[in-house]
Image (cartoon, helix red, strand yellow):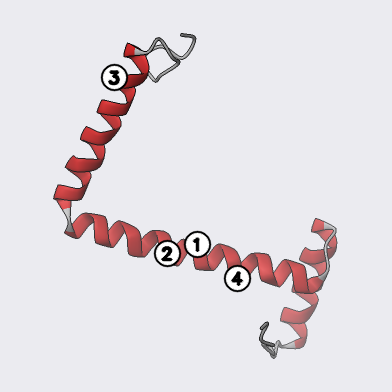
Amino acid sequence: MPRTLTLRLSDDDYEAVKRYAQADGVSMNTWVEGLLDAEDMRRRCAAHAAWISANPAVIEEALAFGEANQQALADAGLPNVANPAA
């Protein structure tokens, strides 16, 4: 079930959001939702980067998995990083 969140903005901030939303051709609600989505993604990416940094073995496994996939594509004659036009 959707939740309602009330934001209290100063008059200047309200006018700024209004201008940005109008410039993007969207409602103020849509513009703010996009801003919150972008902030959420930034935080998720930062958390993922921290987790990856703390787990270097995961990086090695991911790289090995990717190399094996690329080799399998090449072996099958399919497009891959080394030969995108295959």
Residue extending farthest left? 57
Q: Nearer the viewer, residue 76 or 4?
A: 76
* Amino acid type, residue under disc 2 in the picture: Arg
Name the residue beneath numbered marker 2: 44
* Amino acid type, residue under disc 4 in the picture: Leu
Mark 3 or mark 2, earlier in chain: 2
Give the secondary structure at mark 1.
helix
Give the secondary structure at mark 4.
helix
Give the secondary structure at mark 2.
helix
Q: Do the residues labelled 3 and 2 touch (CB within 8 Å)?
A: no
Give the CA distance from mark 3 to mark 2: 31 Å
At label 4, counting other C-alpha atoms closer than 10 Å, the crowd grade (few under 14, some 14-19, many 20 or more) is few
> Residue at point 41% right, 11% down?
83
* Amino acid type, residue under disc 1 in the picture: Met
Q: Do the residues labelled 1 and 2 touch (CB within 8 Å)?
A: yes
* Amino acid type, residue under disc 3 in the picture: Gln
Give the CA distance from mark 1 to mark 4: 9 Å
Quadrant containing the N terminus in the rendered view: bottom right
Give the CA distance from mark 4 to mark 2: 12 Å
Answer left or right for 86 relative to 1. Answer: left
Q: In this view, does 10 lie above or below 69?
A: below
Q: In which quarter of the image is residue 67?
A: top left
Residue extending farthest front? 76
Mark 4 or mark 3, earlier in chain: 4
Give the secondary structure at mark 3.
helix
Mark 4 or mark 2, earlier in chain: 4
Which mark lies nearer to you, 4 or 3?
Answer: 3
How many tags in the picture? 4
Query: Which disc is residue 71 wearing?
Result: 3
Query: Which disc is residue 36 wearing?
Result: 4
Answer left or right for 3 relative to 16. Answer: left
Name the residue beneath numbered marker 1: 41
